[in-house]
Image (cartoon, grey):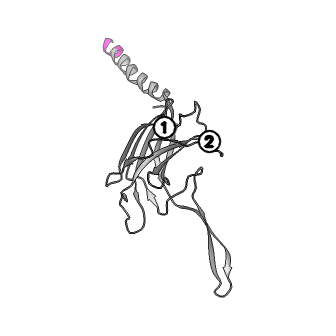
Amino acid sequence: MALRSLMRMLSLTTVVPLSAVAADSLVSFKGGIGVHPVSNVSGSATNPPTNSIFPEVTRNIVRGVNPPGQLWVIDKLSARVGFDGRIRVDGRGLLLAGGNNIGQNAGASVFATLICEAAAPFVQHSSTLAGVALAPNGDFRIDDVLTPPVPAVCDSPVLLIRNANGQTWFAAGIRSFDTD
């Protein structure tokens, strides 16, 4: 009986810190989506001599942030943003998904941007713009504080992983609603 009571007490002490960590988070992300630079292609105009179609391309601009010119993929991403603006991001396998340098990191450095507004004007809360270098396999870690300071509420969060050179977005986080 005493062993059961001890086990219950130990299980409670391991659960409480996890919920306290979740309560300290403004928003978290688990999983990532690599960029597709084009979000839509349509062909509405034709060239009379050849009857070829001129495609109309819509770039994949997310909340005012441009995409790069090439596809990128990401294997895994997890991120947590605290109410104090501290951001911790763990990314795995952020690599080019096309072109002559497919499967490589293009020597890129990346930073994170959190945007909380669903409609313009958008405020970009970013980690240090110089970024962190991608490892040859595309892995990276960001441990920083976002500036400007984050709002108390982030109703429509989007997390973008961006190129430190051109500031285009390479990947986006998938919002997590987990409590742990």
Residue ID for mark 1: 146
Q: Residue furthest top?
A: 2
The residue to which callout 2 is attached is 117
Secondary structure under badge 2? loop
- Residue at 68% x, 76% y is 45
Residue type at mark 1: give it: Leu
Please state which of residues 133 and 165 is positioned toward the viewer in this rendering: 165
Decide which of 128, 56 is in the foreground and name it. 128
Residue at position x 62%, y 41% in the image: 117
* Image quarter (top left, top right, bottom left or bottom right) of the N terminus: top left
Secondary element at tag 1: loop
Residue 42 locus on image (x, y percent): 63, 69
* Overall secondary structure of the magenta section: helix
Magenta region includes residue 7: no
Residue 33 as seen in the image, left or right of residue 64: left
Occupied quadrant, residue 10: top left
Q: Is residue 71 shown left or right of residue 116?
A: left
Using the numbered discs, state the Cα–Cα distance from disc 2 to disc 1 in whole angstroms. 16 Å
Considering only order in the chain, which callout, 1 or 2, is on the residue closer to the N terminus?
2
Q: Is residue 45 above or below residue 23?
A: below
Please state the extent of the stretch shown in magenta in the rendering: 1-5
Query: Residue at the spot x=36%, y=47% of the render?
Result: 140
